[in-house]
Image (cartoon, rainbow, N blue to C red):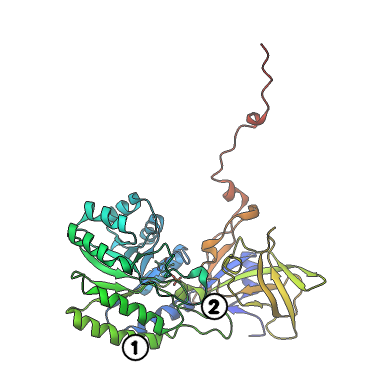
Amino acid sequence: MNNVLEIGGRTARSLVEEFGSPLYVYDASTVRRQFNRLDSAFSGLRHRLLYACKANSNMAMIRLLHSLGAGIDAVSIHEIDLAMRCGVPASEILYTPNCVAFSEIERAVELGVLVNIDNISVLERFGQKYASVPCAIRINPHILAGGNAHIQTGHIDSKFGISIHQMRHILRIVQAYGMNITGLHMHTGSDILDAETFLTGAEILFDHAVDFPDLRFIDFGSGFKVPYKPDDVSTDVETLGRRLTERFLAFCYDYGRDLELWFEPGKFLVSESGFLLTTATVLKQTPSCVFIGTDSGLHHLIRPMLYNSYHTIVNADRLGGIERIYTVVGCICETDTFGTDRRLAETMEGDVLAIRNAGAYGFAMSSNYNSRPRPAEVMMLEGVAHLIRRRETLDDILATQIPLPVDAFTPMEPHHD
Ligand SMILES: *Cc1c(COP(=O)(O)O)cnc(C)c1O
């Protein structure tokens, strides 16, 4: 409308004027749309969606997804506490840790949270201590997901899951302690492109599921792809839903019981809902290009620099008009390029830029590098902007530091006898 960007009924500029810049904004209606898409794709069988809350751990986001019917996939004991503080009961949380202290697993069991075990030695310890407590096992089927090596977790060198080639060892432990394995799980990383890869992984789990008579569910993790570039393909969840439903029901028939199908999406649910709004602070012409310098950087959104991921950037104040080629960078003393050689509407200093797909792994991976405060977060709900996290100050950054007394730094007098 009027060639300016609107998010959930408000212009990006008015949000920056009200809440400051830079600013994270999430449109709740996009989260609902994504949840409902996935939910209806699997409406043909008993299924459960667990929101992987590491993607965006704002309490408003956790509560929004829980209100839609999602459980929570937690990867730290702190995420379990966080979800419970948001009103999610322990029975709706799955704990999928990697390389954590066993004390965290003990705490999760005490809370009544289902633990998903991803290491042989942990399986043994769990069996010794909690033989009758139901648990799940995370299998690494060694299928490769997508093209980005940074976010693949299913390959042979991966630290995640217990290798499918160790199945006999798993079964020996399970049988020796009489363990109650209620779930089999795989998560091969973000960006599984197609239904085919999912189904390949599914077949591997089905093949081995018959060895576990107490199963209640099979969890296919995540890996749903969302479009980051205008011409990107997203996972066709409707086709995946049809094909996997058919295959899963046939498997349940062979298994002799109806199991639940679980997924634990993060990115798919929240990525597209989010925008990082940032102000163009300087335009800088160099011999090779024109930089747009912004008041954000890798301390607020590190995905472009860490994973080389592409995030679409638009000038939120001028969606149409003459385009020029810019390289958009942050203000951190480090190479923090948001996008190289991007076509953007001709930009002036002071314009508001919007970086898309900032709802997942944006704020959640932010830092205080360069002693810079983190931005505020706003959620758009039915046309109303709700501040869901205030902007940090230097006092917030210093809150955990303990100043030494000033004289601690005075050199001691040389000692003379
Ligand atoms: C990160 C993670 C997810 C979510 O991955 P997305 O790519 O954000 O959907 C799911 N399950 C586990 C165990 C994870 O670690």
Residue 85 x/y as whole percent: 38, 58
Residue identifier under label 2: 8
Residue 71 x/y as whole percent: 34, 69
Residue 332 x/y as whole percent: 68, 59
Q: Nearer the viewer, mark 1 or mark 2?
A: 1
Classify residue 315 by image quadrant: bottom right
Please tell me whether residue 142 is drawn above or below residue 400 in the rendered image: below
Mark 1 touches mark 2? (CB < 8 Å): no
Q: Answer with left or right where residue 249 lies relative to residue 145.
A: left
- Name the quadrant of the C terminus: top right
Residue 89 x/y as whole percent: 31, 62
Q: Taking the image as drawn, is residue 267 in sight?
A: yes
Secondary-structure class at tag 1: helix
Please tell me whether residue 63 is drawn above or below residue 272 in the rendered image: above
Q: Residues within 10 Å of mark 1 (few under 14, many from 20)?
A: some
Q: Amino acid at mark 2?
A: Gly
Q: Residues within 10 Å of mark 2 (few under 14, many from 20)?
A: many
Q: N-terminal of the two: label 1 or label 2?
A: 2
Which residue is outermost to the top? 417
Asked whether 111 or 120 is in front, the reply is 120
Please tell me whether residue 1 is drawn above or below residue 71 in the rendered image: below
Secondary-structure class at tag 2: loop
Q: Amino acid at mark 1?
A: Arg
- Quadrant in which ligand 1 is drawn: bottom left
Q: Which mark is residue 47?
A: none
Residue identifier under label 1: 242
